[in-house]
Amino acid sequence: MTSQFPHLLEPLDLGFTTLKNRVIMGSMHTGLEDRAKNTARLAEFYAERARGGVGLIVTGGYAPNRTGWLLPFGAKLTNRMEAHRHRTVTKAVHDAGGKIALQILHAGRYSYQPLSVSASSIKAPINPFRPRRLTSRGVRWQIRNFVRCARLAQTAGYDGVEIMGGEGYFINQFLCDRTNKRTDEWGGTPDRRRRMAVEIVRRTRAAVGPNFVILFRLSMADLVEGGQSWDEIVALAQEVESAGATIINTDIGWHESRVPTIVTSVPRAAFVDVTEKLAEHVSIPVVASNRINMPEVAEEILTRGEVQLISMARPMLADPMWVRKAEAGAPDEINTCIACNQACLDHAFVNKHVSCLLNPRAGRETELTLLPTRRKKNLAVVGAGPAGLSAALNLAQRGHAVTLFEARDDIGGQFGIAQKIPGKEEFAETIRYFRRQLDLAGVDVRLGTRVEAAELIASGYDEVVIATGVVPRVPDIPGIDHPKVLSYAEVVRDGRPVGKSVAVIGAGGIGVDVSEFLTHEHSPTLDVKEWKQEWGVTDPESAPGALTTPQPSPSPREVYLLQRKPGRIGAGLAKTTGWVHRAALKAKGVHEISGVNYERIDDAGLHVSFGEKRERPRTLAVDTVVICAGQESVRDLADELTVAGMTTHVIGGADVAAELDAKRAIEQGTRLAAGI
Ligand code: FAD
Ligand code: NAP
Ligand code: SF4
């Protein structure tokens, strides 16, 4: 068979079993693991990915005992009753032609509960609970629990287990001097710090026999002070290989690291060099991971021949048919994960079930179904932003006749502006996906067409979906019509010239993004080398933990970012990405000013004061003022059509502008389409 991706789609013979291709769906905690009542949903979630052709699925993490829980009463696998329940999952995956391994995850000092344990009693900076230091006997008990968990997984029908040895969790805590201050047989020297990890693998192999996959997730760059040296990492890899591991999977960075490792501004495949470097030292298959989201990238890595497998987690949320589309030579049909974290990791961190901004069906496969319609309707969708795009596509895929009107010359709406922000280049993939899929689904797309109510009424559509979105709010500030004032859309989308000093009014998600835009010299693609310099990441061989001093490139402008409310700028940004934005703005020297009153704008600049009494007047002598003060709904069409008696549905920003994001817009569009 000739294929566009021959290496990616080549089977991998592990001796006792064969993986049908080189794609591993990496472990993701969906939240469905935590409660028995969600087992059927979880089974269908995995089965859909198995049908999509992935070679091996790794489940979310299961603790080997209560001390290892991620959260109180979180997922664990400790007895036969729990193992029996897992049969629903393994059967569903096997029936769908897939293979699945259970991840054993002991959170150690990251366990968010008072029972937590670790090598030493050192609190993690991101967890209020101080772990209890294990006794030597306690360590042996933990090892037995890992082995018991693996045996139970085997009886539950899993094809293997993944032992989580990275991300700053329990095993990783034993491996590093940073968190292991013991002087007994489990610490004090690098080989004694490694001993627990190696014992777990050795005893697991002895317990499960030779015909069971054992993946070891190995931290190849801890990205924290006091992380492992390169020699220690290589020794660990070689020892877990000798102890019986089948595959070594890559892990990069601890949760408490100051370096982002998977958000969208991290360049694609940014850490593959480390995996390739390690692969030279072992003879078992090694897996590359982190920010690999398209078949071309995966194929290029595999073609170089150092690593044998690619792990992708979030891309399988965004598109369960990822592998099938690669097999069909149609990568342009893939709904590419944009690494936004908005519906996956951000949900996980607030105890919500994981889904996907681009694919709201993820994790809800049994609930949100999009079946072929039994009554074809003639539908108009107005507005090709995320809300209109998702509605139009899903409606057409269900069999309706759909006409999509868009006033501008391209689809995307506000999301099209987002793709121009440095570090958000991936957002262009979403526009590409919709463009291709609208074409395949036969949607009649009318670009450059600002449709009027009269035309919609005259055309006799059965129903109209109003997805006309939002426009930037124009705040009521004296001098707002001064020539130095621009909207964010004029700056980012239209490329209007901006001076050397700029005040940004409004510090929500868009104000922060615009500040990033203004503080970067723009390049069309993300450069891995430059990015590593900016964040202070080096070759793990030159520094333990792979950290060095960050060297951010200087900002081409002086930027002031302002908000009226008191308190920290960016406090409302998302948990897993907000800190990255705040660190980036700090590195670029953005002046952050809270609690301002906007007095006026004139030739001298932006005049502000502080407090209710409008004290401490200050003039920011800026060349340009960029307005990022939120948005307002565009919904005049809806009102006119309703008066005319047409069946209309209002979604996305046209419905509610406050706290609007693409996640809500796409989910609303999809749910509406499921119901028409
Ligand atoms: P819009 O995107 O506003 O789309 C409405 C569309 O309707 C427009 O294309 C408009 O031209 C068209 N239209 C209006 N009237 C008519 C008419 N009469 N006839 C034909 N067409 C019409 N969201 C996130 O979730 N994550 C992010 O990281 C993120 N980053 C962002 C960064 C920036 C810089 C910006 C500007 C936005 C960002 N957003 C982000 C917000 C996100 O883009 C919006 O929430 C989303 O686009 C709203 O979708 P919508 O479809 O409701 O409306
Ligand atoms: P936003 O988050 O609501 O922020 C609007 C900002 O404008 C606030 O800082 C607000 O702060 C200020 N403001 C509001 N009314 C004002 C007025 N009349 N005069 C002056 N200032 C005013 O909206 P946004 O930044 O426009 O973002 C829109 C949506 O896009 C957000 O909801 C977000 O979800 C999404 N988005 C997400 C990301 C992401 O990375 N996830 C990135 C970009 C955008 P004060 O009232 O304190 O001044
Ligand atoms: Fe990827 Fe964002 Fe979807 Fe998460 S929510 S899977 S990061 S596209």
Image (cartoon, rainbow, N blue to C red):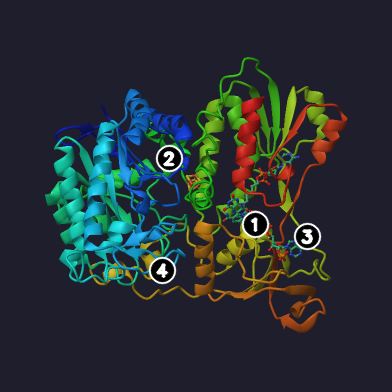
Q: Earlier in the sequence, mark 2 or mark 3?
A: 2
Vertical order, 184 against 53 (above or below): below
Q: Nearer the viewer, residue 180 or 598?
A: 180
Q: Earlier in the sequence, mark 1 or mark 4?
A: 1
Q: Which residue is mark 2?
A: 33
- Secondary structure beneath dot 2 equals helix
Image-quadrant location for residue 631: bottom right
Q: Is residue 99 left or right of residue 345?
A: left
Relative to 265, say whether 125 is above or below.
below
On the image, numbered disc 3 is attached to which residue?
A: 474
Task: Calculate the distance from the C-alpha at mark 2 to the C-alpha at mark 4.
Answer: 34 Å
| Quadrant (top left/top right/bottom left/bottom right) for the N terminus | top left
Question: In the image, which disc is placed on residue 171?
Answer: none
Give the residue at the far bottom of this rendering: 616
Q: Is residue 410 visible?
A: no
Which kind of residue does numbered mark 1 sit on? Asp
Point out which mark residue 535 bears: 4
* Mark 1 touches mark 2? (CB < 8 Å): no
Does label 1 or label 2 sit earlier along the sequence?
2
Q: How many neighbours does mark 1 have within 10 angstroms: few (below 14), some (14-19), or many (20 or more)?
A: few
Check disc 4 and report its element: helix, strand or loop: helix
Q: Nearer the viewer, residue 639 or 173?
A: 173
**Which residue is drawn at the image coordinates 68% and 19% (left, top)?**
377
Where in the figure is residue 138, as x and y percent of width and height? 25, 58
| Circle 1 residue | 494
Q: Is residue 163 left or right of residue 43?
A: left
Structural crowding at the residue carrying mark 2, measured as other residues with C-alpha within 10 Å and reported as few (<14), some (14–19) or many (≥20): many
Quarter assignment of residue 322? top left
Closer to the eye: label 1 or 2: 2
Residue 237 at x, y percent in the picture:
18, 55
